[in-house]
Amino acid sequence: PDGSKVAIVCKFGIVIADRQLEQLCSISDNVRIKSGAWDSSPSGGTGSNLFLYTTLNHVKYCLPSGDTGTIRTLDAPVYAVRAIKDQLFCLDREARTRVIAIDTTEARF
């Protein structure tokens, strides 16, 4: 959100790097990654470092420290566009907008 980090998303992995493209962490997943978005909560702190991404069945998070986790399961695949606090704004496969309630307490701790 502040332009200090970038997330490079590929089919089965994510690389988080700083502004000079120095790698901060790299994670891999067993399931294809569909999309991702930085949490743009105005509070700063961990929120500005929280990258949320979706797979076929889950919403997951990744921190620049390399910590990862699952936030919730999904009924149908969605494509993340933006995340603010406890809401994930996304598109479904029919290109309809969806707002999904998420609990990012674990990721912010």
Image (cartoon, rainbow, N blue to C red):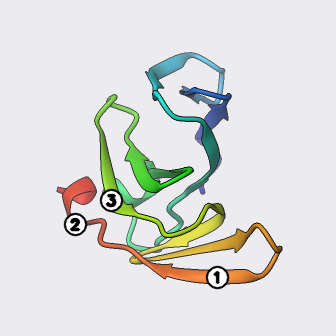
Q: Name which residue type carries label 2.
A: Thr
The x, y position of residue 91, in whole percent, is 72, 71
Q: Can residue 50 be seen in this view?
A: no
Q: Is residue 21 above or below residue 52?
A: above
The residue at the far front in this view is: 75
Q: Can residue 93 be seen in this view?
A: yes
Q: Name which residue type carries label 1.
A: Arg
Contact check, label 2 and label 1, Cβ < 8 Å? no
Residue shown at 38%/62% (left/top)? 73
Residue shown at 44%/55% (left/top)? 58
Give the residue pinned by disc 2: 105
Give the SS element for disc 1: strand
Residue shown at 66%/29% (left/top)? 11
Real-space Cα separation, disc 2 to disc 3, in angstroms: 9 Å
Q: Residue 95's image quarter?
A: bottom right
Give the SS element for disc 2: helix
Give the residue pinned by disc 3: 71
**Horizontally, is 93 left or right of 98 in the view?**
right
Q: Callout 1: 10 Å neighbours few (<14), some, many (20+)? A: some
* Lower sequence index among marks 2 and 1: 1
Find residue 98 and name its label.
1
Of the 4 image quadrants, the one containing the C terminus is: bottom left
Number of the front mark, 2 or 3: 3
**Horizontally, is 72 left or right of 99 in the view?**
left
**Horizontally, is 42 left or right of 103 in the view?**
right
Q: Name which residue type carries label 3.
A: Ile
* Lower sequence index among marks 2 and 3: 3
Residue shown at 59%/35% (left/top)? 32
Real-space Cα separation, disc 2 to disc 1, in angstroms: 21 Å
**Horizontally, is 54 left or right of 59 in the view?**
right
Observer-nearest residue: 17 or 71? 71
Real-space Cα separation, disc 3 to disc 1, in angstroms: 17 Å
